[in-house]
Amino acid sequence: MTIFTDIGQYLLMIKGMFSKPENGKMYWKEFIHQCSEIGIGSLGIVAIISVFIGAVSTIQTAYQLVSPLIPPSTIAQIVRDTVILEFAPTLVCIVLAGVAGSRIASELGNMRVSEQIDALEIMGINTKAYLIMPKIIGSLLMIPLLVVISMALGIWGGRLAGTAAKILSASEYDKGLLEAFRPYNVIFALIKSYFFAFIISSIAAFYGYYVKGGALEIGRASTKAVVVSCILILFADYVLSALLL
């Protein structure tokens, strides 16, 4: 019954977020803060991962395409579609579940344990709307932007590795990027990123907001939030791929 209790509590938390703000400026300030923490705070790790994902994809694709009948530009096509469809939205969001998700869970968990949330509720503030909604909206805004940046850096990393290892020339890589390109792939990746962003932020907020105990329980809640988020991301990835592709 615990899983049904958690699902019901999670749905009530989402429902409780929708209320008129007590102070619009206060909510806006919190929203900007979350955008900065989630977006700028995660940009470095996203950039590093994306470049190396593209580079490794190019090298491994070239290793497998050994037939002289296959033009080198095909490598760029495979890297492009792999990065856009799967690596950029899914792998980056799994990393963000560990970076941004654990931060959200720890922040709310610390506020719950130190009774800051109780103090805000005594002051008449809807803590679900003030503390959770800016995090979810900030994630829905910034995580898709990070995914777009990841796509560009992944493709650029593949180009850099391909030319550095003399697998193919820059002109051949650029030619392959334009061949058989389907804009729908980018739209599909963005749709996935919005679903993943909501999963990351809402699940982390749920486990952090309802934590009980002390510092040890905060760590456990953060770990559980990351694990559950990763599982749900992979499940949603399969469902969305089956429905939209």
Image (tube, rainbow, N blue to C red):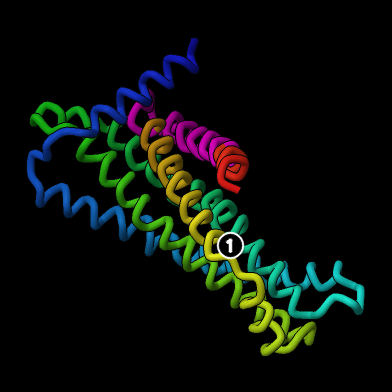
Residue at 86% in and 67% down:
64
Q: Is residue 103 left or right of residue 172?
A: left
Residue at 58% in and 38% down:
239
Q: Is 101 rendered above or below residue 73?
A: above
Q: Is residue 234 left or right of residue 211?
A: right
Residue 192 lies, in percent from the top left, at 50, 49
Farthest residue, direction top: 1
Highlighted range, magenta: 208-235
Mark 1 Cα shell of 10 Å, populated few (<14), some (14-19), many (≥20): many
Query: For mark 1, what is the residue?
Result: 84
Residue 211 lies, in percent from the top left, at 38, 27
Residue at 31% in and 23% down:
12
Magenta stretch containing residue 234, yes or no?
yes
Q: Is residue 86 left or right of residue 150?
A: right
Residue 120 lies, in percent from the top left, at 15, 33
Q: Main secondary structure of the magenta part?
A: helix
Kind of residue at badge 1: Ile
